[in-house]
Image (cartoon, helix red, strand yellow):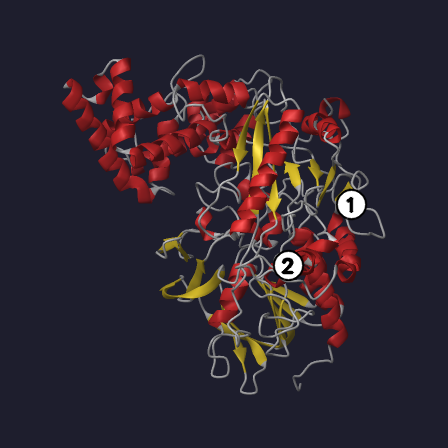
Amino acid sequence: MKRVNAVIVGAGAAGGIVAKELAVAGLSVVLLERGKWYTANDCRKDDLRNQRTTVLGNAFGPEDEGNPRVWVDAKGAAHTSLPSEGVYQNDAACVGGGTLSYGAQAWRYLPQDFRMRSTYGAPAGSSLEDWPISYDDLEPFYEKAEYEIGISGDYSGTPFHGPRKRPLPMPPLPPGREFGILEPAAKRLGLHPFHIPMARNSVPYNGRGPCMRCRWCVGFACEVDAKNGSQNTVIPIALGTGNCELRTECMVKEILTDDRGRARGVAYFDESGHLHEQLCDLVVVSGCAVESARLMLNSKSRLFPDGLGNRYDQVGRNLQGHHYTGAVGFFDFETYDDIGPGATIAVSDYNHGTPGLCGGGMLANEFIRLPIHMVDRLPENTPRWGLGHKQAMRHWHKRCIQIFGPTQQIPTAIARVTVDPTVKDKWGLPVARISGNVHPHTFEIGEIQARRAETWLKEAGAIHTSLMAGKPEMVSAGQHQAGTCRMGNDPRNSVVNRDCKIHDVDNVFVIDSSVHVTNGGFNPALTIMAVAYFASDALKKNWKGTGFRS
Amino acid sequence: MRVFVSVNEVSAGLSGGAREMLMISRGKAGQLTRRQFVAAGALGGAALAVGCKASKQGDWEALTDEQARTLAVICDQIVPADDFPSASQAGVLNYIDRQLMRHYRRHREAYREGLEKAEALSRKRFGHGLALLAEPQKLEIVNALAAANGKFFSLVRNHTMEGYYGSPRHGGNRDAVSWRMLGLAEPPVRGRAQYDLTKAAS
């Protein structure tokens, strides 16, 4: 197999961007993806089998068959889990990764989100830290992501955002009915409501048309291709250069190192299970927080007996996602307009600045609900079944609004990914083992966020409300998973440096949410993209040509 | 032998894609033209042939007729009929039966045991099988089942909700009846212009 300059593992939000940046710069690239390249036709309006409602499985990978993980409960007992179960902490396995089917909220983190330890100090039992890069370092790359991926929205309603040089490239979609109900209520409370930034075309952009406002959005691939992910933006550009080859259904087994401790390529299984070696000058790991950590830990060799980048036992630690809390409000008038994507309005007044709390999070209305989502979201005194339940479905389906948000997590070193000593996947590779829990202060913040959501709903006229502020006894990772290969200056408590290069090895990079030191109080996709542009920029600047003699 | 009595039953037996084509090809009043009906019948025949091969003991793929009768009673307590169909009338058994051969294979044993237990409860308390009881007695047994075997009952409850409120493509929610009940247009209006602000603003 022909040697190439770069192998990128994972064609998701970050991997797609790195592939495009390197291919456009003239490097030869092989982009390996364990999943398939799906289109919207592979999951048309299937509300029981998509990436959000998975009772009949994941639409965009991984399949339940042959892809187990292990999770450890609060009592220390280990359980095998299926990809369609919540405890699996799935994101996706496909070209585009999570960005094929996400809700597409495209937030910039706030300047304080990169300086959490300096701002608040580290709570006991936490591993709260500052990023080694600042908002200002990332700002040009946020902008690049907003323009190349395509973001609509309008920040003008809120003072709570970092400095920005250009407005978003597209205006927001016209507001829905919930926006009309929630906006004046938020203003009466002294808040600053505004249009959620979305990786979704509101007008024709990038050669594709605008959103048709259907109700099949989050969890689904867009039928009119108006939702922007790496699969319909940067990856086609990468392939168009002629320098990038995308190989789907290829599962990377390990990163191969030579006896000088440099990476020489990767070993991977193709779709028929044959093992190949792809040699290269540099390896970029972009498999998302759980799988990236797993690959590093599975890449054991004489020089790296505990896995690559793991000299100080840091790979896999600080696993975090978001602790979602909020409230559902029930109204005596119709709030439902059947116009997608549904999530339209947010406030970020509560992300920082509450005395006694280390942060907070954004609050927004939920994506448009499908009937199946309403089954367990009825007022608290509703019977779980029977005529009462059926009537309540009828009564409330068009008369409720949910507000919730991603509470920024306080990371802990004990929330972590390791590889399981016994359980293997269908390729015979040790699977990810997920253990630890959420820091108690995160729950305190989440609880207050839920009450704030409730207050907003009551101000908007809700006649009943129910709080959503659970305290799950396990880590929170899921589609917002992050943190497992932390970025930092000190090799003893981080895995990669500010350029996303692992401390130990010159030519191995981790570029995805794994490097997030903290995960902001927002959906992480745009930050993953900005970091990918930032790291690609450094990679290109440091590129000194191939190490291979031809 | 299974007889398709309505267009909707025919379409419920089709794959999602074929079904969608069928729905799109309907006339204005939601009726099929004679020619379309014949075509649908041909498609339905193909589905029927596959169905026959899979079902060895009756109309079902995974369930026996007896299990199906018991399950229908339980499902119909979970979503009873009122102005809108009950769970079994809306094809929920279809949904569960199909999934027991597919994604829910792992639950087959739980169904076998749970349905047996429900029958035993019914015989013990009333001397008859569940399907023969009067409505209040059925409810009493289903309540008893929920108390005695909560795990199984939760499973059936969740599967019933999926079959009733989920996509018709999986064999339940016949003719999208639950979505119509909730006042949702089905199929949803497609290609609507985002520029139509009259509908967007309240």
The amino acid marked with disc number 2 is Gly
Percent of width and height locating residue B18: 50, 34
Using the rendered image, report if marks 2 and 1 lie on a common chain. yes
| Residue at image mark 2 | A121
Residue that appears at 82% across and 40% down = A156
Camera-side residue: A161 or A546? Answer: A161
**SS for callout 1:** loop
Camera-side residue: A14 or A504? Answer: A504
Real-space CA distance between mark 2 and mark 1, rounded to the nearest whole angstrom:
43 Å
| Residue at image mark 1 | A205
Quadrant occupied by the N terminus of chain A: bottom right
Q: Chain of mark 2?
A: A
Specify the quadrant of the image occupied by residue B162.
top left
Left or right of residue A161, residue A19 in this image: left
Q: Is residue A299 above or below residue A216?
A: below
Mark 2 surroundings: few (<14), some (14-19) or many (≥20) residues within 10 A: some
Left or right of residue A457, residue B159 in this image: left
The amino acid marked with disc number 1 is Tyr
Residue that appears at 48% across and 47% down = A58
Residue that appears at 54% across and 58% down = A124
Camera-side residue: A312 or A299? Answer: A312
